[in-house]
Image: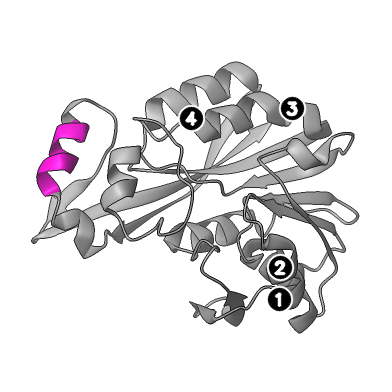
């Protein structure tokens, strides 16, 4: 039995506040989590089967279930070995039913089909991930452009979507957005931007500004420098079959 030694508070003026159990193996949600939730809230129809891929503590699935008027069938997975216990604890707290599996991307979902897959698997260039505060005790095998895992999701996701299904996925500015979108458009018939949010990067990235500038010059990441801060963004896209 895992010991959920910490708690994460999701705070939103428009959506409300939600508190979640997490442990040392759980990825702590970031601005990207809020962007995904806000971008996808109106994407669901009654009876939809939904997969929260890279779910962490279950924050996306659980908040969507609480705020969505339609009844949806929730599924969630993460590579963390404690994901099943953590997500079930949080789901019980908010009276939400969700089928949870420990899974390396789609490994545990063979023979499953979904109307909507929401991807929140890490997509940050590895050199940025190493100096950021985001991946302590968390795997981040994302490659030089931060696109290894999202490309795998893009390639495999059509096999897990029902006809007319959709993939909702974020791209963080600290990854190779052009390469990711190029592949998304090759695989899916239609890709559109749902939401784009800008946010100040943590101080750890500002302290490594020369590294960021080097990666930006190579075209691997994107960001702005304003008033002594590093400004990144999260762009949330919808890809339709």
Q: Is residue 183 magenta?
A: no
Residue in view at x 16 percent, y 56 percent: 206
Q: Position of residue 66 (x, y in %)?
A: 74, 74
Give how far apart the Cα atoms at labels 1 and 4 are: 30 Å
Q: x, y percentage for residue 94?
A: 75, 80
Provide the residue designation for mark 2: 87
Viewer-proximal residue among 112 and 228: 112
Which residue corresponds to the image point at 55% horizontal and 46% vertical from the top-left? 121
- Looking at the image, tell me whether mark 4 or mark 2 is earlier in sequence order: 2
User: Of label 2 and label 3, which has the lower sequence position?
Assistant: 2
Q: Are marks 1 and 3 in contact (CB under 8 Å)?
A: no
Q: Which residue is mark 1?
A: 90
* Residue on which the image places disc 4: 148
Q: Could you tell me which secondary element the residue under label 3 belongs to?
A: helix
N-terminal of the pair, mark 1 or mark 4, is 1
Image coords of residue 62 (percent x, y): 71, 69
Badge 3, how many Cα within 10 Å: few under 14, some, many 20+?
A: many
Q: Secondary structure at mark 1?
A: helix
The span from disc 3 to disc 4 (Cα, nearest Å) is 17 Å
Give, as a single range, the part of the protein colored magenta.
Answer: 209-216
Q: Quadrant of the N terminus?
A: bottom right
In the picture, residue 93 is in which quadrant? bottom right
Above or below: residue 233 compared with residue 167: below
Splitting the image into 4 quarters, where does residue 119 fall? top right
Label 2's element?
helix
- Is residue 213 one of those drawn in magenta? yes
User: Real-space Cα distance between discs 4 and 2?
Assistant: 26 Å
Q: Residues within 10 Å of mark 2 (few under 14, many from 20)?
A: many
In this view, the mark in front (2 or 3): 2
């Amino acid at each position: 039995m895992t010991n959920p030694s910490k708690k994460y508070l999701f705070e939103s003026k428009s959506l409300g506040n939600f508190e979640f159990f997490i442990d040392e193996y759980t990825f702590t949600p970031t601005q990207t989590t809020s962007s995904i939730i806000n971008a996808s809230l109106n994407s669901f129809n009654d009876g939809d089967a939904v997969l929260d891929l890279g779910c962490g503590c279950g924050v996306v699935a659980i908040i969507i279930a609480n705020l969505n008027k339609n009844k949806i069938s929730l599924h969630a997975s993460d590579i963390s070995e404690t994901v099943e216990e953590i997500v079930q604890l949080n789901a019980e707290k908010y009276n939400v039913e969700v089928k949870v599996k420990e899974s390396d991307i789609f490994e545990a979902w063979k023979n499953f089909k979904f109307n909507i897959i929401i991807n929140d698997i890490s997509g940050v260039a590895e050199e940025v991930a190493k100096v950021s505060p985001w991946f302590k005790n968390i795997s981040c095998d994302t490659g030089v452009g931060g696109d290894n895992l999202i490309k795998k999701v893009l390639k495999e996701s059509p096999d897990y979507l029902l006809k007319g299904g959709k993939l909702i996925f974020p791209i963080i500015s600290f990854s190779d957005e052009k390469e990711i979108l190029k592949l998304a458009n090759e695989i899916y018939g239609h890709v559109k931007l749902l939401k784009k949010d800008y946010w100040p990067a943590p101080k750890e990235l500002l302290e490594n500004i020369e590294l960021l500038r080097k990666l930006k010059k190579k075209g691997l990441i994107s960001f702005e420098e304003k008033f002594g801060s590093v400004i990144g963004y999260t762009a949330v896209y919808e890809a339709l079959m």
